[in-house]
Amino acid sequence: MHNSQNISETRDFIMSQTDYRPTIGLILGSGLGTLADEIVNPYKIPYSEIPHFAKSEAIGHANELIIGELMGKTVVAMKGRFHFYEGFTLDEVTFPVRVMKALGVENLIITNACGAINTSFSPGDLMLITDHINLVGTNPLIGPNNDELGTRFPDVSQVYNLDLRNIASAVAKEQNINLQEGVYAWWSGPAYETPAEIRMIRTLGADAVGMSTVPEAIVAIHGNMKVLGISCLTNMACGILDQPLSHDEVIEVAALARDKFIKLVKETITRM
Ligand code: HPA
């Protein structure tokens, strides 16, 4: 569990660098970081310069915190996130969420690239996350609870906020963006799933599978933030098609979905 003093030190560092006071947070997944380029008058801070932040080396990620204006709102965006599979602890993976909350962020948009398990979905589709399944066997809140940050036993009956989901759905409809909805299963990685594992995960009730998002969402709920989760389905999950998976394909397909993803998120932010 995070230490309040570390969070305050990081918040104070960021507030000493910029006068921006963000109310919306964005965590940008693999291949989706270009949304951060839409931020007007951006103030950028490399993670390596931020006290108490871990350093990420995942391919496809830029590793900068970007603060500025987007659609008239003040936002803070993570271009690149920390993954459990990189060897970071879940405290390291989720620390930026605590910092966002301390900066004044109430609404957090978490995005990712993931594999489609539901066979009515297609690569390149976007998916609104309605709920999640934690398959990793650990939880970012394990350890003594810091009561200043949240309650010991948080309610997770609505992790992905219904009001925010309704806004995103309405935007998608108006903008003619095909927005799927479904349950996201968190897989540790870094190996993709086997065909047998995908059959298991489908049986368990998931529509998509990926290696991020769930720890950040749990910590955001613990911190009483509202969460919106948007996935880019970059591939059919392993074994659905007779072809191997590759990270290059994930990045390529995410880039193809870029324009509609940016449109969806920007217009949703306008109405938040
Ligand atoms: N599985 C897990 N993570 C992923 C996938 C996948 O098929 N595609 C992109 N991230």
Image (cartoon, rainbow, N blue to C red):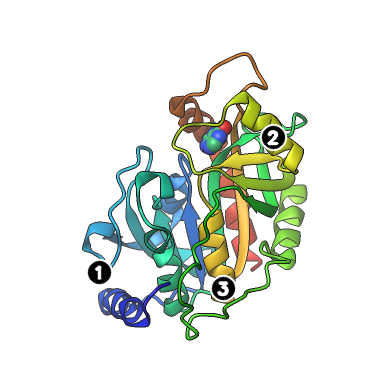
- Circle 2 SS class: helix
For the residues labelled 3 and 2, the Cα–Cα distance comes to 29 Å
Residue tagged 2: 200
Q: Residue at x 35, y 41 (%)?
A: 58
Going by the numbered disc 2, the residue's amino acid type is Met
Q: Distance between the residues labelled 1 and 3?
A: 22 Å
Q: Dividing the image into four quarters, tell me where ligand 1 lies.
A: top right
Residue that appears at 63% across and 46% down: 185
Closer to the eye: label 3 or 2? 2
Residue 68 appears in view: no
Name the one closer to the observer, 253 or 50. Answer: 50
Spatial separation of the CA atoms under disc 1 and disc 2: 41 Å
Local SS, label 1? loop
Instruction: Please count the marks in the image.
Output: 3
> Quarter-wise, where is residue 231 in the image?
top right
Chain-order first, disc 3 or disc 2: 2
Residue type at numbered disc 3: His
Q: Residue 14 carries which label?
A: none
Image x and y of residue 133, in percent: 66, 51
Q: In which quarter of the image is residue 195?
A: top right
Residue underneath mark 1:
51
Using the image as rendered, state which of residue 198 and residue 237 is in the foreground: 198
Residue sitting nearer the eye, 193 or 17: 193
- Asked whether residue 205 is in view, the answer is yes
Q: Residue at x 44, y 62 (%)?
A: 94
Q: In this view, does 162 lie above or below 134?
A: below
Label 3 Cα neighbours within 10 Å, binned few <14 / some 14-19 / many ≥20: many
